[in-house]
Each structure stands twice: as C-alpha cells, then as structure tokens.
Image (tube, rainbow, N blue to C red):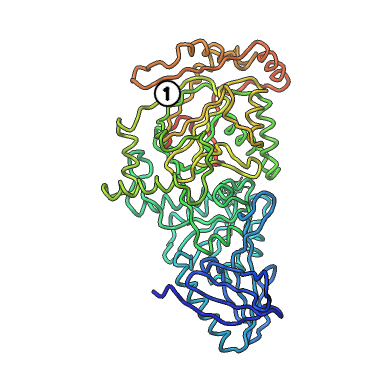
Amino acid sequence: MDTDVRLESSLWVGNKRYRAVLTGWYFNWTEVDKNRDKKTVSVPVAEVIGVEEGQVEILPQKCVEDTDKDFTVFYVKRSSSGGSYGLLWRLGRTQFSCPSRVLRDQWTQHLRAALKTHGPLRPHRLLVFINPFGGKGRGRKIYHSLVAPLFELAGINSHVIVTVQANQARDHLLKKDLTGFDGVVCVGGDGMFSEVLHGLIGRTQQEAGLSENDPTVALQPCPLHIGIIPAGSTDCVCFATVGVIDPVTSALHIIIGDSQPLDVCSVHNPSAVVRYSVSLLGYGFYGDVLAESEKHRWMGPLRYDYSGATVYLSNRSYAGVVQYLPADPLLSSPRDNTRCLSGCSVCSRSTERLFHHSSDSGSLYSSHLSQFSSDSEGEWVSVKGRFRCVSLTCMSSSCPKSPLGLSPSAHLADGTADLILVWDTHPLGFLKFLYRHITTQDQFDLPFVEVHRVKAIRFSPSPEEEEEDDEEKLGMSGAVNEKEGHHVQDGETRSSNGSQQHLAPRGVTKHQKGISSLLCGLCCRKAPAVSVWNCDGEILPFTELLCR
Ligand SMILES: Nc1ncnc2c1ncn2[C@@H]1O[C@H](COP(=O)(O)OP(=O)(O)OP(=O)(O)O)[C@@H](O)[C@H]1O
C-alpha cells in the first residue's frame, strides 16, 4: 500500500497564495507572500472528513457553487467551549483555488487516495436507530440536520430506523440480518444505548452458540462498534467516552473511525436473568430516584431533579450484605487521582493482559473469567449493614451535572468497576456526599463512605433485619448503625467461609439523630423494606444479584 502520497503546489485561499503540501500523513498549507510569522495550517489526513469539487458548504445547509478550478476540504477542527477545549469538535472547511482544472483534479484525487490509505477503520455502512422520544424529543431533528449531512459528506451509507416502541432496536439487532453493516449508531440517551448494547451482545452470543444466562460461560466480544449521537436526558455514556455531549463531535468521531473499548458488567440473579451495565448499577438512593422518576416521565429531564429531591427528603436506608472480589491494588486504585481518557495506560495494559492470556486459552475472556473461579485470584470480602446506597460503576459516570462523576478515577476499559458503599448516616451528611458530586471536593473523604476497585460483587438485601429495626428506623434513621457500630470495634472478623468480613463501622450521634428525626418528621412515609437496582437507567426486577 502506498502510504506516502505526495503532492505540492501553490494554491489560493481567498486572495492569498499558499504553498500546499500533501505528505503521507498530513495536508499542510503555508502562506507564501509573507516574510514573517508565516503560519502553517496542518491537518492530519486521518482527520479529513471529505473533499468536494467546487465551493461547497455543508452546515447548516448544503450549498454548492460548481467552479472547475476550486475544491473544498472538510476536516476536524478542535474548538472550545467552557472547560472543554479540544474536546468539542467542529467541521473545519477551507476552499482552495487552483490555477487549472487539471491541478484541481490532481488535488482531489490525491487527497481521496490518502484518505483511503489513512482511514482503514472508517465505517462505510451504518445502521442508525433514532429514539424520537428520548430527552426533549429532538432525536430526529438532531440526526437529520446535524449528523446525516456529515455522514453523506464522508460517503457513509446509513440505514435509518426511527423506533416506534421500546426495545425495537434491541429486537432488530437480535433477529434481523446485519450483513454489510460496519457499526450501529443510536440517537438517544443512555437507555437507547443500553438497548443497542443488549441487542449486540445477545446477537453475538447467539451466533457463537453461547448462553448469556450462565455466569460461568465466557462471552464473545461483539464485532460491531456502537456510535452514540447524544439526544437523551443524561447521555452519561457519551459524556464519559467522548468528553462532551455534542452531536457534531460524536458524528465526527464516528466518521474517522475512532473507537474506545468499554468495560461491560454482566448482572445475574439466582435464576439466571442477565443484564449488562456500563455505567451505574445503584441500589438504595439511585434505585429509588429512578423508580420515582419513572412516575414523572412527563416532566422530561427535569424529572431526575424532582425525584432526587423527593427521595432525599424521604431519608431512606436499606439493610443488605455486599460481597466483593477486590481488583489488584498494585495496578490502580479508585483514589489515585488519575483520570482515564482514550489511550489510558492502565486500560491498555489490561487489554494486553487479556489478549495475552486469551492466546494461551483460545478465548479473549476465558482468562478473565477464570479470575472469578480461581481461589488464587483473591478472597471475597463481605460487608453487612445499612446503606444509603450501594453503587457499582464501570466508568467515572461523569455527566455535565457531575463533571468528575461518581468515581472520578474509574477506568473505561480495565476489567474492573468501583464499588461505592455509603453507610447509613444523618441526612446532612448524606447531603454533603451528594453535593460533593457537583463540586471538585472528594466525595470519598467522608467517614461513612468507602470505595473499592473490584472484579465482581454479590448483593443480597436483608429485610429480616429491616423488620427487626423497623420501629427504630421510623423514629430515627441511623439507630441501626449505632447498634452495628458496636460490632465494628472488633475490627475485621473472619466469617465461616473464611472470607474477610467487615461490619458496619458507622455511628450516629444523638445530635445527628435529632436532626434526622426532624427532617424525617417533615416528609417520611413508611419506607419499603427493600430498594430496587438502577441498572444504567433501567429498574431491575430483582434485588439479589451477582455482577462481574
Ligand atoms: N419509540 C419509542 N417509544 C417509547 N420508548 C422508546 C422508543 N424508542 C426507544 N425507547 C425506550 O426509551 C427509553 C429511554 O430512551 P433514551 O435513553 O433515548 O432517552 P432518555 O431516557 O430521555 O435519556 P437517558 O436514558 O439518557 O436518561 C429507552 O429505554 C428505550 O428503550
């Protein structure tokens, strides 16, 4: 393959003359009739979106003035907005004039040939699902006015399906012929992404003859990539992977074939129903907020704020047992103040390890799975008590409201997740924890919060404890903690199965109880014995689970 396509000539941009050079990797142009401060614009060929004959404009509307000595080059231009410098991408556009049509044709042919050579991972055919009801209901408009013109410019053929009901995208991916597609694009929010993820993972396992429901079966990786055009209420997966919520930026990433591997957590219950999570799996507060928000869908994205306030004021905590398998602390830690971005070295090493083992064992994931069955991979740790929330997040789960996210140092693709345990505490303490998510303060630096990097967790609610403590709880949240705090003074104990067991270490003072009962008195209804799990914005129909 010729990787060093080369062309050099004088070209005009407006009334200024430039020396334009196309090397193998870059297209540069430098003003020539200037003695000092000569500026060179340099565009990597991999970031050229398209080359058109004539003077062409694409956004907001396509308009072409077909002159036979001009051509227009479209490319990725890094832009800034607030703190997102470089993350926000725009369509850069420069019109060049040549002295002759022959030279113009030479330039367009060479640039297109260079694009082919340097864009081997670019998609040619995409299956696009639009949720017309996601977020503020602007999915269709966003796609047709901002994204489709870019795909067309880049020569991508798109097959568009506007969904008419929930799970249509998932079922289509599970059942229909997908031959010829290079990827799937979802226009919507995290729920829509989750649908597509479930469809693709399910389809891949079906074709490989594997059961998704068996927690001991190694899953096959999906051959198709997923692109996200954000048009939902939260768009957390898009924000965590791209860094901004912007349809044009996402479309440009898709066009140039960028990709970011993602950890996927599989969630099993004892009767083997499975779901997959890439962002938040939350019990307690986050589960209750989702359940509450479902009742107020008509409010649009505002429903999350409303439900958050309502659930906070209801001041609930839940009893349960959490067991977790810690990840190797020498590789990374949830409090090491790193920030995972594309090209992260921890994730790259993890991918190398997986591939390295897989070449020995024949499957990408079998080595990874063996970590859960082999005793030598570590001991399960067990904790029991009352929690405000139990959260597991495979990524930082950052979003515009919480720019650092639930676990700021979580990695996108290292095979681990961060387990955040928020023990029962007084309402003001919990408010402080929640508030820290929207500031840069460390939300883990609180006495009732723990964070662990894990490879797997198990959870079971203990409503029997709830019943025992019901009376106390109705009066004052935290009483159970005080009781359990008594056990903690013994520190870590060994449970009968030999794993380490920590008991709830938190106490609540009389003063805190006073505040608690005051707030509770204002708003408390009798709390339910168990919460629900919020799995990437979907309520799970079970509370006892195994995740890995
Ligand atoms: N045509 C449709 N009618 C009703 N529901 C749909 C349709 N298409 C998709 N859905 C479902 O709507 C749910 C929510 O969609 P989506 O994630 O796009 O928007 P959102 O909930 O506003 O955003 P977010 O998930 O980011 O909060 C998804 O679970 C999806 O399965």
Is residue 131 at least partly visible in the picture?
A: no
**Image quarter of the C terminus:** top left
Q: Residue at coordinates 40% horizontally, 15% vertically from top-left?
A: 493
Which picture quadrant has residue 75?
bottom right
The total number of labels drawn is: 1
Q: Amino acid at mark 1?
A: Ser
Up-down relation of residue 497 to residue 439 (above or below): above
Residue pictured at 61% horizontal, 80% vertical: 71
6 and 187: which is toward the camera: 6
In front of the other: 106 or 473? 106
- Establish if 164 lies above or below 468: below
Is residue 379 visible to the viewer in this orientation of the structure? yes
Q: Is mark 1 within 8 Å of ligand 1?
A: no
Q: Position of residue 39 (x, y in %)?
A: 64, 69
**Closer to the camera, 124 or 290?**
124
**Percent x, y for residue 42?**
58, 68
In the foreground, 212 or 223: 223
Which picture quadrant has residue 346? top left
Q: Position of residue 224 (x, y in %)?
A: 44, 58
Above or below, 485 against 534 in this view is: above
Residue furthest to the left in view is: 360
Q: Which residue is mark 1?
A: 382
State the SS at label 1. Answer: strand
Q: Position of residue 324 (x, y in %)?
A: 42, 29
Q: Residues within 10 Å of mark 1 (few under 14, many from 20)?
A: many
Q: Is residue 161 left or right of residue 62?
A: left
Instruction: Check the picture and name the quadrant holding the N terminus.
Output: bottom left
| Residue pictured at 55% horizontal, 15% vertical | 481
